[in-house]
Structure formats: C-alpha cells, structure tokens
Image (cartoon, rainbow, N blue to C red):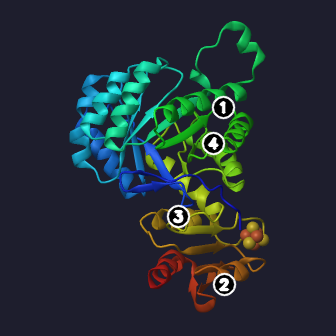
Amino acid sequence: MMRRRMSRPISIGDVTVGGGTPVVVQSMAKTDTRNTRATIDQIRRLEECGCQLVRVAVPDGEAAEAIPAIKRGIAIPLVADIHFDYRLALLALEGGVDGLRLNPGNIQDPEQIKEVVLAAKERNIPIRIGVNAGSLPILHKAAKHEHTIVDRMVSAALEEIHLLESLDFELIKVSLKAFDVPDTVAANRALAERMPYPIHLGITEAGTPRRGVIRSAVGIGILLHQGIGDTIRVSLSGDPCEEVFAGYEILKSLDLSQRGPTLISCPSCGRTEVDIIALANAVEERLVKIEKPIKVAVMGCVVNGPGEAREADVGIACGKGKGVIFRKGKQVRTVEEIDFLTALMAEVERV
Ligand code: SF4
C-alpha cells in the first residue's frame, strides 16, 4: 500500500479535497463561459462521465455574470479561473462559485489579493494558488538566471501561501504545473514538504489525447505513487470527458479508485486465432456506460487467457473460433466467435 501525504482537508462545495480522502478527478469546461446554455450542457456531460469538480474560465465581466445561471444548472461544485483582474474574482464570489483559482503570476498586487481573500474568507470559499511554469511572477533579469524554473515555481507558491496565511486564510489548495514532467515532479515534491495544504496535480498543456494522456499519466502517476496529490486534472486538447476518463484510468492503475470497469485485454499476437483487438475495442465501448467497479478480461489464447479470465470478475479466453467465458473464477460457458461480445456482456450484467 502506498502511503499518501496527509494534507489539510478543504471543502469545495460538497466535495472534500485532501486529508486522505479519495483523489478527486476534475476538468475544465471548454465552452465560452458567457454561453450559459453550452457551458451547462458540457458540464452535465462531464457529470455523467464522473467529473467531480469543474472549472470555468472567467475572462471578463460577462463571464462572471453567467456564474449564477451556470451554478443553477449543474450539480457539481464550480470553480472560477481568474487571471489578471482581481475584480472578476470578487464578481465570481458574489455569483456563488464554490472555489477560486488565482494565478500568482498575473495578479501580483498584494492589496488586490487581500481584497479577494477577505471576500472569500467571508463566504468560506477556498482558493487554489495555481502556479504555471509559463506564467511565473516576473523576476528582474539577474534573479531569472540565478534560479531554476522549479525554484521559481515553488517560491511563487510559497510567497502566495504566506500572503494568504498573513490574512488568516487557510482554505488553500496549491498546484504547480509545467509541461515538463521532471520539473513538475521536482516542484511538487519540494512543495509537498514545505506546506500542509492539499495539492492539485496536472501536467499543463499536455497535448492531444494521444500524447497528453501519456505525459499526464507519467507525471501525475509518479507523484501519486509517491503519495503526493489530492486532486488531478488531465489537460488535453480534446473532449473534456476524455480528461475525466484518463484521470480515472490513472487512479485505477494505482489502485486509488474503484470507479467503473477495468478492462484487461491481451495485445494479440501470432497465437491469436480470433480478432481479439476488435473484440477488446467493442467491449470497451460497451463498458463506457457501466459504473460498477468490475474487472473484465478479454484474452486471445490459452497461454495467459484462462488465468487472467479466471482472476477477473468476467473474462473470456478465446481459441480457434470459440471462447470460454468465466464469471467470478468459474467457467460458465463456451461460445462461438459470433456470440463473444453478447455472451460476455450478458455475464457482465450478471455480476
Ligand atoms: S494471451 Fe495469448 S494471444 Fe494474447 S498476447 Fe498473450 S500469447 Fe498472444
């Protein structure tokens, strides 16, 4: 069992982040926040795929004014992403957001931050200090060369944490994100030892689903395995539901979540005598709608097939034109290739 870092828990709406509670999977709406209908629709879709917290960009007053309507239309807690203009954070708070994300790199006036913090404190609303390698607070030229990017990310977070603590505000969550995985890992490790607050993990601008999922899984996975991280977001140039799906797959790979099915499928090889790749993909598609935590194995031959199929909740070990189906370790039936998918899914329903 990996030991998780024990952070100080905070509540964002009805979701607890930190304090050893299960890692929370979040995403961000990709719609224009001012388009209330589209934003609500996308967040509802995110809710259906298991997203637990959602962030929306608040680039202007009109977006901030859309917050009350968005809040009314959705069920999960809503976080407002604020850059440059502290007044948008004040408007978002008035609009009823459940959390704020502030970037220390682009709201640097302590008086402005103070105003936001006091308004958040009054409403018991947490603030994420979201440091990004691409938008660090400006340093004078000499200092820029003296410090590594990792040092600068950690210092930016610690300075902001100290400012919030000086205002007697501790509903804090912190994120340090970079595109570079080693930098992200090093920065989060250094930060985790130096402050007690929950950590939000992510690899920023990770790319298209094909590349971004891998980069995120490596970065987020390393840190989670070291016990660091209370909430995660996989940032992809793609459908936000893909971010949520990838988030849960990362957690399931580390036994940190039981949500939904786990598919074990063999890669197929020269021994395979059926189209195992097509079958695995068809099963994956069918499993999308299933929420119960169930392990399903789709295997191509007798080498590892019966073993894996028996270990899973439901499994199939295929041979020449036939497949043996297992449920909860017991062989339940043998089916013809044409019936593989329907027979396997029927057993999934029975578990
Ligand atoms: S389970 Fe069998 S068919 Fe699948 S990859 Fe292994 S040896 Fe090949």
Give x and y (percent) for residue 159.
Answer: 59, 27
Q: Earlier in the sequence, mark 3 or mark 4?
A: 4
Mark nearest the camera among 4 and 1 is 4
Q: Which element is circle 2 on?
A: helix
The kind of residue tagged 2 is Arg
Q: Which residue is mark 3?
A: 284
**Residue denoted by label 1:** 154
Residue that badge 4 annotates: 195
Q: Earlier in the sequence, mark 4 or mark 1?
A: 1
Residue 52 in percent (x, y) is at 42, 54
Relative to residue 233, is residue 239 drawn left or right?
Answer: left
Alpha carbon separation for disc pair 3 and 4: 41 Å
Q: Please, what is the three-letter code of the amino acid marked with disc 4? A: Met
- Which numbered disc flags the more N-terminal residue, 2 or 1? 1
Name the secondary structure under disc 3. helix
Work out how far the residue at label 2 is from the one at label 4, CA to CA, in angstroms.
46 Å
Mark nearer the N terminus (2 vs 4): 4
Q: Earlier in the sequence, mark 3 or mark 1?
A: 1
Q: Quadrant of ligand 1?
A: bottom right
* Disc 3 + disc 2, Cβ < 8 Å: no
From what the image shows, is residue 294 above or below residue 253? below
Q: Residue at x 33, y 33 (%)?
A: 119
State how far apart marks 2 and 1 are (Cα): 48 Å
Where residue 208 appears, as percent x and y from the top left, is 56, 37
